[in-house]
Amino acid sequence: MLHFDYFRRSPEAYRPWTAHAAMRAAEANLLPLEACVYLGTSIKPLNEEPIDLDDIEHILSRPHLDLETNLLLIRILTKLLRNPDAEVALFAAESINVIENRYTKRIEALKGKLKEEASADVLRSLAQQYYELAQMHPGTIRNFYLREAFGYIKKLSKLKRLGRQDVVLLVRLLLTLGLTDQAKRIIDQLTDREDPSYLLLEAEIAFKRKDIASVQKLCDRLKTQPRHLDEDSQALLSYWFEGNR
């Protein structure tokens, strides 16, 4: 019998703030195990007002966050930098440093490996890390990181080891730098352009070039292979086929 009545109890009941505290309370039979599960897996949307600093700290405690989560955190924390409460602003600044330092440490570790051997996997990881770091910065700093990522992709290309995901990253780098013509030339040189990943990129390039007719044609071609598309790609197709009627 699951003890979900814990959530219906009086506010005076013991309510731990962290999953660790909940686990200790459960071990002491002060709380049911459901309290640990709840605190370990449940969290409100991070950007929901008022912003919960405990939730942000809880997410930041995880050492391996994906790019989407990091970008969401950076957006929220950048907003908090302007908070009139000095402690909140300091928390935001320190949290941003935590995220950036994680990337810096990973990059330095990869560069150390690169000195030992020009491994394709290390070059690929360096390009990806710099690309992700670039997404968190505006202007000149952003372009610097993008060019660093581009440099490692070029080194990978010289090893004749470019895979599909490497080509996708290269084209995204060029698009982010605003180099749509160069991105188009890379796609035009591919022998397997019917690959869904490449068709999606080609559609993105066409959209940035304001060639809406080509976007529609490319989406028509993608529609014939829905099994090879992830949820985001299917949502994109749904927009073009349903949202543009």
Image: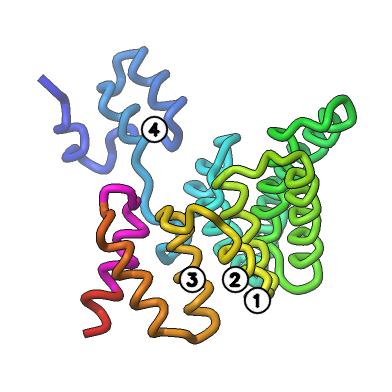
Pointer 1 with pointer 3, Cβ within 8 A:
no
Give the foreground label among 4 and 2: 2
Residue position marked by numbered label 2 in the rendering:
184
**Could you tell me the amino acid type at mark 1?**
Asp
Residue matched to label 1: 181
Secondary structure at numbered mark 4: helix
Residue at (39, 21) in percent of width and height: 23
* Separation of marks 1 and 3 at Cα, in angstroms: 12 Å
Task: Determine crowd level at label 4: few under 14, some 14-19, many 20+ residues with C-alpha closer than 10 A.
Answer: some
Q: Is residue 202 above or below residue 155?
A: below
Q: Is residue 181 above or below residue 200?
A: below
The residue stretch that appears in magenta: 227-239
Whether tag 2 and tag 1 are in contact, CB under 8 A, the answer is yes
Q: Residues within 10 Å of mark 3 (few under 14, many from 20)?
A: some
Say which of 236 and 49 sits in front: 236
Q: Name the foreground residue: 6 vs 72.
A: 72
Residue 61 pos. (x, y %): 57, 37
Residue type, label 3: Glu
Can you say which quadrant of the picture contains the N terminus? top left
